[in-house]
Amino acid sequence: MSDTYHHGDLPSALRSATAELVAERGPRGFSLREVARRAGVSHAAPAHHFGDSRGLLTSVAVEGFSHLADALTAAAEDCADARERLRRCGEAYVETARAYPGHYAVMLDESIHDPDNEALQLEGMRAFAQLIATIETLRDQLNPELDVDTAATLCWSAMHGLVELDATMATIADRHDMPVVDIETRIDRVTELMISGFASR
Amino acid sequence: MSDTYHHGDLPSALRSATAELVAERGPRGFSLREVARRAGVSHAAPAHHFGDSRGLLTSVAVEGFSHLADALTAAAEDCADARERLRRCGEAYVETARAYPGHYAVMLDESIHDPDNEALQLEGMRAFAQLIATIETLRDQLNPELDVDTAATLCWSAMHGLVELDATMATIADRHDMPVVDIETRIDRVTELMISGFASR
DNA sequence: GTTGCTAGTTGACAATGGAAAGATTGATTC
DNA sequence: GAATCAATCTTTCCATTGTCAACTAGCAAC
C-alpha cells in the first residue's frame, strides 16, 4: 500500500479487508494473517488496534449495524403511509445485507463477535428502533390491536431468514426446475403477506 | 474410548463430538484435532472417514436435516386441521433447532458444509417437502388464493430467523428492561400472526 | 500362514493466533 | 532545533491447527 511506516487509517483498511475475506470464504475462512497481508501490513499489526481477531470481527459488526441503521432511517424518512414504509424498510434491510455480505455474516452471530461490546449494542439498537417505530406507525394506521413486539419479531426474523436462506432456496428451486425467484421479489411478496396478517384482527 | 484398536462406530462418535464442540464454541471454534481428542482417537483418524474437516461438518449437517425431517413428519401426522398442523410444525422446527444446536449451526451455512452433497440435498428436501405439504393443506382449507411458495418462504424464513436471532433478541429485551419472551412463546405468536395473513385474501 | 483390506497411528509440513520485545515515526515539550 | 514520549508497526517466537504420506494393528478369506 503506501510506502510509509505508518499506514494512515489501518483500522478501517483492516475492516474492509475483513469484510472482503469473510464475504469470500465465510467466517471460518477468515484469518487474521490473511487480512493483514491484504492490508499490506505485518501479521501482528491488527492486534494493536483490535486486540485479537474477535475484536476486529466485532468492529466489522459494529460498522455493519451502522450501515443498516442508516439505511433503515433513510428508508423510513418522508414516508407517511405505514404499509409503504414497512415495504421500504424490508427492501432496505435486504439491500444492505447484500451490499455488505461480509459485514452481515458477522453481525448477528454471537459466537463470532463480542455481544457485550457497547458500540455494537448501540448501533444494533439504533437499527432495531427504526423497525419498532415503523411497526408502531403501522399499528396506529392499520390495526390498534396489533402487538408491536410480536410483529417486529416476525418482520426481523423473516428478513434475516430470507437473507440467510437465499442461497439454500435458490439451490432448492434450481434442483426442482422451479423458477428461481430473486430475493428482491421475495422480500416484496413476503412483506405483503405479513402486512395482511398485521391488518386482520 | 474403548481400549481396542478399532473404535466400533467412529464416524458417529465424531459427529457427536463435532456437534458438541460447535454448540460450545461456534463453527469458528471447531477444530478437527479437538474432535478427534474428544472421541479418544488420533488426530488423523477422521480423515479416513470424512476426508477433510468440511466432509465431517457436512455429515453433521446431513444428520441435522434428518432429525428435522423426522420431527416435521411426526408433527404433521394425524393432524387434520391445517392451522394446528402449521403450529405444530413451527414448534417442532424450533424444538429441533434447540435440541441439536451444533447440528443446526452447520445445516444452513453453505460456507461451512458442502452444499452439493447429495445426501444433504436429499434430507434437506425431505424436510422442506413437509413444510410445503402443510402449507398446501392450509391453502385448501383456508384460502385457495394463497401462494404456497411465498407462504412457505415466509414460514421458513421466520422460523430460521427466530432461531438465529433468539440470543440477540434476548439481549435486546434484557438491556431495555422488557420481559424476555422465551422462544416457544414467540414461535406460537408469530405463527398465529402468519396464519392471519394466510387466511386474508 | 500369508495375503489383502479396513481402521488407526505417527510424524512431518506449512499456516495460524497470539505474546513479547524491538524498531520507526510523529507530536510535544523544553 | 533537540530531547523525549507515546503510538504505530515489525520481528521473532511458541503452541496449535489441517492435511499428507508412511507406517501398523487387527480381521477375514483362502
Image: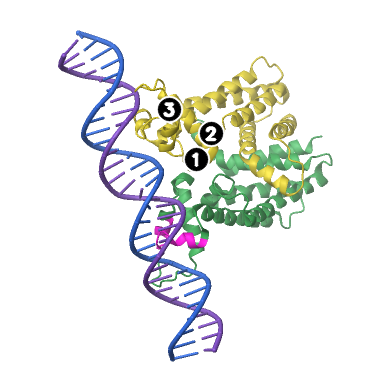
Chain colours: A green, B yellow, C purple, D blue
* Residue B108: mark in rendering: none
* Comparing labels 3 and 1, the label whose residue is closer to the camera: 1
* Viewer-proximal residue among A147 and C18: C18
Q: In which quarter of the image is the C terminus of chain B?
A: top right
Instruction: Write the start and end of the magenta stretch as one range.
Output: A35-49
Percent across and percent down for residue A163 are: 57, 42
The subunit carrying tag 2 is: B
* Residue B102: mark in rendering: 2
Q: Mark 1 sits on what residue?
A: B27
Q: Mark 3 or mark 2, which is nearer the start of the sequence?
A: 2
Specify the principal SS of the magenta part.
Answer: helix
Q: What residue type is labelled 1?
A: Pro
The answer to whether B78 is drawn above or below residue B18 in the figure is: above
How dense is the environment of label 2, judged by Cα within 10 Å: few (below 14), some, or many (20 and up)?
A: many
* Residue B118: mark in rendering: 3
The subunit carrying tag 1 is: B
The answer to whether B31 is drawn above or below residue B96 in the figure is: below
The answer to whether C30 is drawn above or below residue A70 in the figure is: below
Q: What residue type is labelled 3?
A: Glu
* Left-right relation of D9 to B171: left
